[in-house]
Image (cartoon, rainbow, N blue to C red):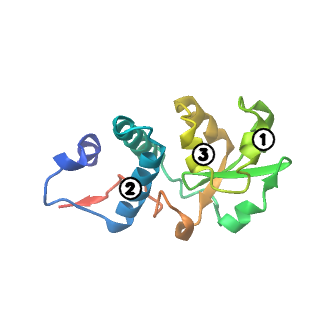
Amino acid sequence: MVSLYRSMSVYDRPATTTVDPSLALSAKAAVSAALRLALSWKDAAAAVAKVTTVINTTPVTPALPEYSLSEVSAHCTSDDCWLVIYDRVYDVTNFLNEHPGGEYIILEFAGRDATIAFRGTRHGKDSYQMLEKYLIGDLIASERLYRTSTTSPTSNSFSS
């Protein structure tokens, strides 16, 4: 049943379906970010679809350690560089010299949330897959913007 809902647009879902409020906030934040990145109304639908796909296909792994934004902010140099992208924490120190756009672009967001900047450059699927090898943890639940629990936004999020 959950996979059926993933393939349906919000407007096609049955009227009796309700969304878990904690997950609705996450979706609202994602849609808001996508709309800010869109160049036109025509691009807006595509941007929302891309952000939704990324969020729905990137599971939260409960086994990973959790970090606060203040802990992440301590790692903001070229010798120790962490980023937050979609509420996940990445240690990209070893990737700085390999980044095609130059290390200064990553260092601009070192120790901070780089989600909007990452999305704004329209990275492809390969970039998201590459991120996985640098994944070291998740943000603590109270500081997450895109995920508000330890489950992915689509798992068991609807009730009849």
Mark nearer the N terminus (1 vs 3): 1
Q: Amino acid at mark 3?
A: Ala
Q: Residue 94 location in percent, x, y?
A: 79, 39
Q: Which residue is mark 1?
A: 104
Kindly report the distance in space between the C-alpha atoms of the residues bearing marks 1 and 3.
13 Å
Most distant residue in the left direction: 15
Kindly report the distance in space between the C-alpha atoms of the residues bearing marks 3 and 2.
18 Å
Q: Amino acid at mark 2?
A: Ala
Q: Which residue is mark 3?
A: 117
Q: Amino acid at mark 1?
A: Tyr
Q: Residue 90 location in percent, x, y?
A: 67, 49
Determine the secondary structure under disc 1. helix
Determine the secondary structure under disc 2. helix
Q: Quadrant of the C terminus?
A: bottom left
* Left or right of residue 12: residue 59: right
Which image quadrant for residue 49? top left
Which image quadrant for residue 105? top right
User: In front here: 41 or 112?
Assistant: 41
Q: Residue at x 54, y 51 (%)?
A: 86
Mark nearer the N terminus (1 vs 2): 2
* Left or right of residue 51: residue 24: left
Q: Which residue is mark 2?
A: 27
Q: Residue at x 27, y 40 (%)?
A: 7
Number of numbered tags placed on the structure image: 3
